[in-house]
Amino acid sequence: MSAQLRSELLKARTTRTAAGLLLCAVALTLLGVFVEGLSGTAAELARAKQQRLLLGAGSSGAGFFATFAGLVAVTAEFRYGTIRPTLLAEPRRRVVLAAKLAAAVPVGIVFAVVCLGLSFAAGLAILAARHAVVVLTTGDLAALALGSVAATALGAVLGVAVGALIRNQLAAVLAVVAYAFLVDAIVFAAVPSVGRFLPGKAGDALSGRPVDDLLSPSAGGAVLVAWTIALVALAAVRSDRSDV
Amino acid sequence: MGSVVSAVELTKRFGEVTAVDGLSFELEAGTITGFLGPNGAGKTTTLRMLLGLAEPTRGRALVFSRRFAELERPATRVGAVLDSADLHPGRSGRDHLRVLAGVAGAPPGRAEELLELVDLAGAARRRVGGYSLGMRQRLSLAAALLGDPELLVLDEPANGLDPEGVRWLRDFLRAFAAEGRTVLVSSHHLAEVAQTVERVVIVNRGRLVADVPLGEIVAGSSSLEDVFLELTAEPEP
């Protein structure tokens, strides 16, 4: 298992895919920081809610692209056929899946640390430049950071599970994009009492996004963990049964 | 001490199509066997079942008397190349070996040694997307050898190799078998097969049509090609 985990971590580092996705996450983070930090009035920026949006701007990009990193870690193996050499060396499918799930955690943490570090640093600089007093407490900031790290790591793990379920890279990417921008957003807008239990919104809650109708961060975290367990279980069954 | 490879009434159906149909054969240690058949005869499907990548619909596919998935450290027993395209184009040749080396049980330095062996040391840092077909074949072979296996299973390994590469592969496989190890190699290059293998297993439409020493086939005036075409001919309508 540890050999397979080392192999999976090395795979993530030996192509440019994960690094490219991290760059995309950084770009989205910067965009979020500038939108949240520069578009509003100074009075708005002094409010706790706006400061959460600004400093936590890294969580959206990190979560979205870390999910893709997890997705691609699996689907690239099917796309390029490397799943065959992988399974010839370690034919126990669940060991390979478990190693990929475990490897997604540090990948997600790296995404979150980079993006949150960036949105914290740039956000605090913008607040200082615009003479807004930081009203969030250290505890608030710690909860925001830790929640975002946890949500991003779970997002990467979910990406692995969804990738193992769908396998086809294009289909998996389209499914996640359609889910994130359509299903998640529409259901939450139409029926927030249901939509807040979807994994995307549960992740937003865990990340401490100040959006009305979201679950509490701890409840969001519990819901996201439940989604992760369910999808991992389905992925395990699928990977046991399928020919490659 | 059982057979190195044993297929027993091996059958694989994909929906209505029966790709492999009650196929049985065995391989003894220290031999090179050619696994021949027309396109779509079920060769690759059979190899996938032997290697635990596909589940038989019926029958058994055993290597070293066990199902592949039940082997301890399988890469130290079996090395296989099913498709030389099974490489990530964005990863370097060296990194392709590095990601597999630990799991395969390869000692440190084994990857470098194999890159030398397959003459890729100079291209090891380049990404595989820029490799020729022959280079991919050689890299895939190196990956199959990481665990220093006792059995090599190769699907069309000569595809894309230049004449020098073909000769090198032939000499390599002979030396490998001379150490008491076993090779199962599928191929369409009958002339090449006739120079390399000791035994041929020929399949057609998923069924076994011949399992004989090469010497018996080419003893008469007919060539392996004549026999192959005769055995795999489409029946007259």
Image (cartoon, rainbow, N blue to C red):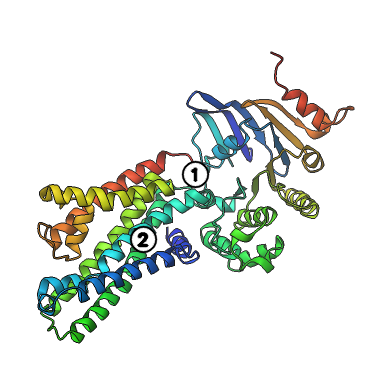
Residue B201 in the image: state x and y as whole percent: 70, 32
Eye-nearest disc, 1 or 2: 2
Of A238 and B181, the residue lying toward us: A238
Task: Determine whether A185 is above or below A34 in the image.
Answer: above
Task: Determine whether A75 is above or below B1 in the image.
Answer: below
Residue shown at 73% from the left, 42% from the top: B32
The crowd level at tag 2 (other Cα within 10 Å; few <14, some 14-19, many 20+) is: many
Same chain? Circles 1 and 2: no
Residue A182 in the image: state x and y as whole percent: 25, 49
Q: Residue furthest right?
A: B221
CA gap, disc 1 and disc 2: 25 Å
- Number of numbered callouts drawn: 2
Give amino acid for label 1.
Ala
Whether residue B18 is visible here, answered yes or no, is yes
Instruction: Look at the numbered disc 2 and give the secondary structure of its residue.
Output: helix
Left or right, A208 with reference to B91: left
Task: Determine whether A39 is above or below B168 in the image.
Answer: below
Residue A151 in the image: state x and y as whole percent: 25, 62
Which disc, if any, is residue A104?
2
Of A75 and A2, the residue lying toward us: A75
Do the CB atoms of the residues marked 1 and 2 lie less than 8 Å apart? no
Left or right, A164 with reference to A116: right
Residue B78 in the image: state x and y as whole percent: 60, 48
Whether residue B2 is visible here, answered yes or no, is no
Which disc, if any, is residue B69?
1
Residue shown at 69% from the left, 45% from the top: B182
Of A5 and B17, the residue lying toward us: B17
Left or right, A79 with reference to B130: left
Give amino acid for label 2.
Ala
Instruction: Look at the numbered disc 1 and give the secondary structure of its residue.
Output: helix
> Quadrant location of the N terminus of chain A?
bottom left
